[in-house]
Image: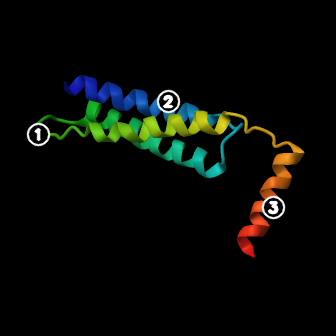
Amino acid sequence: MFNWYVALLAISGIIMIALASVKNGQSTASRSLNLIFGAVYLGYAAYLAFLFDGGSYLIFFQAFIVPVMMVVNFFRNRTPRPKLTETQKAWREYQNTAQHS
């Protein structure tokens, strides 16, 4: 179980660092978070694999929610937004002015 946990941490870190290297479709903040979390996950995996002497440790499978959310966010931001037609733009403008009145 320990080896699987370390491998999943390392894979998650590598994926998040790879997502941070893609510039198109992401904000700077999103790329920075991917890089920071990826480095933390990869660093913790390296610590557990090479420096950890044994003893007791806790496995937090909830930690893998963050990489999944980062990947979902990455692909959601890359999906092109539909262009509004002139009628849709006029309707939105009308709704905005009606709400503020």
Q: Are marks 3 and 2 in contact (CB under 8 Å)?
A: no
Q: CA distance from mark 3 to mark 1?
A: 63 Å
Counting residues from the start of the chain, the first of labels 3 and 2 encountered is 2
Q: CA distance from mark 3 to mark 2?
A: 44 Å
Residue 62 appears at what percent x and percent y?
30, 41
Q: Quadrant of residue 9?
A: top left
Residue at x 27%, y 36% (from the top left corner): 61
Q: Which residue is mark 3?
A: 94
**The disc label shown at residue 82, or none:** none
Residue 36 appears at what percent x and percent y?
49, 46
Label 1 environment density (alpha carbons within 10 Å; few <14, some 14–19, many ≥20):
few
Q: Amino acid at mark 3?
A: Tyr
- Secondary structure of residue under mark 2: helix
21 to the left or right of 64: right
Q: Amino acid at mark 1?
A: Ser
- If the image is split into quadrants, where does the C terminus sit? bottom right
Q: Are marks 3 and 1 in contact (CB under 8 Å)?
A: no
Label 3 environment density (alpha carbons within 10 Å; few <14, some 14–19, many ≥20):
few
Residue at x 67%, y 33% (from the top left corner): 79
Q: Which residue is mark 1?
A: 56
Q: Nearer the viewer, residue 5 or 79?
A: 79
- Secondary structure of residue under mark 3: helix
Judge depth for marks 3 and 1 and give the one in front: 3
